[in-house]
Image (spheres, rainbow, N blue to C red):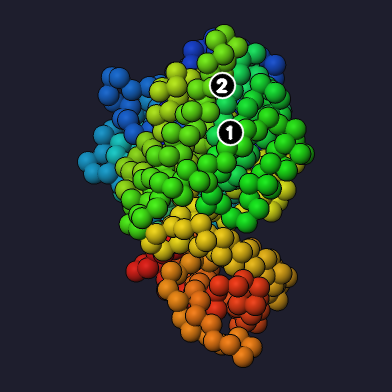
Amino acid sequence: KILILDFGSQVTQLIARRVREAHVLSEVHPCDVTDEWVREYARDGSLKGVILSGSHASVYEDTTDKAPQAVFDLGVPVLGICYGMQTMAHQLGGKVEGGHKREFGFAAVRARGHTELLKDIADFSTPEGHGMLNVWMSHGDKVTELPPGFKLMASTDSCPIAGMADETRHFYAVQFHPEVTHTQQGQAILERFVLGICGAKPDWVMRDHIAEAVEQIREQVGDEEVILGLSGGVDSSVAAALIHRAIGDQLTCVFVDHGLLRLNEGDMVMDMFVGKLHAKVIRVDASDLFLGKLAGVSDPEAKRKIIGGEFVTVFKQEAAKLTSAGAKGAKWLAQGTIYPDVIESGGAKSKKAVTIKSHHNVGGLPEQLGLKLLEPLRDLFKDEVRELGVALGLPPEMVYRHPFPGPGLGVRILGEVKKEYAELLRRADAIFIEELRNFKDDSGKTWYDLTSQAFTVFLPVKSVGVMGDGRTYDYVVALRAVQTSDFMTADWAELPYALLKKVSGRIINEVRGINRVTYDVSSKPPATIEWE
Ligand code: XMP
């Protein structure tokens, strides 16, 4: 395994992720572990290398951290990244100076000499034949003098020592960030270190993560009871399946059906978790309550507040029942928080991010309920959570589902929400999704997988149509399908006409009450993905 010592950079978990992508087990631990801890950690011989992460701090402030000296005495390879390079230089007798200006962004780095780490890895070559790397830099301080035994490995104009190596001791360090995707050869460099230099075996698979996580959950929770708010979304579902694997009936899931879910969604969740996994799930049918509160409300943000607020109220009532059983009552609240949520809540929050979070991760609830927080997916990225879900036996259709907003159909029925509208929309949307799964492009991928998010919007207006010999005067729906990598910007998807034709024909024929189907051809920005 690889030990990653965390000096507090926001991207430390990305290093771990890259190591996992190389199929090697890695563990992140705080940089201030003791020398004894490090020696004990390495005692069984499974430790193949150490990576020192970046930080926001400067090695020259008194308060900042150093790597435990033992790391350099273990005889295993060490890679320092950014601050990790600076502390390595500082601790091993080199010199680090405060940069006069911060260097932040892309840089072209020239690889010097032939080090094991960078040999034959380059994005392009100079006329003289030097390998050049396009990398991402983010630092103020820099190494100005190599420690004894080290040689220059890489440089840029503004940072003459951008990489250094002591190949006899297998110590390597780079000032840039190989873990971020902006560094084009980043994965290659990290794999070179982990697989080549450290000689770690690429035999780690997500399945192994289950065993580790299960053990950790058992250790953390002991014989206490856990409750979890199950929404049917990817994160809470995977968290539930994982925790259930670990502690079985000590977990109780609470599934609040707010009446604004997709067709058969509640039944599907129950079939999966109760029918197949035999988990304890309390299904709360609160649709009348939610629809009652929403009556007469048409402002999108007001609707969001009501749905979010009611959700918390209902969940708290259920949780109170489960925690009130004295010593036997639940002591833990589990949440499907994933790593991007952790970054989001630590960094600057956009208004939207706050709104989104209030539905997903019932913020502040653990304190209010007097519960301890269990977040077994905290270190994982979305695609890893999906992979884990599949490894846990959840159906791929559930795990690879498009995102669905917390307020559900509440923001896909424009204006006032009515039960009748929700029923029409649910049926129309199910047809659209079914056909997206049926139609494939030339490469054999379904249009569901070719789009990032697709859904139907209910427009509370009526238009005239003709059916058989009669005139109809019915509702209109809009189909929405977008392609995006980050949901911040999005293009409308160029769905095949044959698919649109099939969907429109089916909706108008099968859903009495809708006589017109339109396709939304607006991109984000200036439109948003959802209509409200
Ligand atoms: P927009 O409409 O802002 O959507 O382009 C971007 C992404 O956010 C989702 N979204 C929400 N998710 N609660 C959520 O949990 C909300 O209130 C909400 N509003 C939008 C939207 O589905 C898309 O994936």
Label at residue 185: none
Q: Earlier in the sequence, mark 1 or mark 2?
A: 1
Q: Which residue is mark 1?
A: 254
Residue lying farthest to the bottom in this orientation: 469
Residue lying farthest to the front in this orientation: 470
Q: Where is residue 56 drawn, in percent x and y?
A: 34, 34
The answer to whether the residue labelled 1 contacts the one labelled 2, judged by CB atoms less than 8 Å apart, is yes
**Kind of residue at disc 2:** Leu
Tell me if 43 is positioned left or right of 145 in this view: right
**Kind of residue at disc 1:** Val
Label 1 near ligand 1 (CB < 8 Å): no
Q: Secondary structure at mark 1?
A: strand
**Badge 1: few (under 14), some or many (20 or more) residues near its Cα, within 10 Å?**
many
- Picture layout, residue 180 above or below residue 448: above
Q: Where is residue 528 drawn, in percent x and y?
A: 39, 64
Q: Secondary structure at mark 2?
A: helix
**Badge 2: few (under 14), some or many (20 or more) residues near its Cα, within 10 Å?**
some
Q: Which residue is mark 2?
A: 322
The answer to whether residue 180 is visible is no
Q: Nearer the viewer, residue 239 or 427?
A: 427
Q: Where is residue 464 drawn, in percent x and y?
A: 48, 84
User: Which residue does the image show at 56% across and 65% down from the upper left?
Assistant: 424
Tell me if 510 is positioned left or right of 178 in this view: right
Tell me if 309 is positioned left or right of 477 in this view: left
Spatial CA distance of label 1 from label 2 is 10 Å
User: Which residue does the image show at 65% across and 13% down from the upper left?
Assistant: 223
User: Which residue does the image show at 65% across and 77% down from the upper left?
Assistant: 509
Residue lying farthest to the left in this orientation: 100
Tell me if 448 is positioned left or right of 29 in this view: right
Q: Nearer the viewer, residue 522 or 359?
A: 359
Residue lying farthest to the right in this orientation: 276
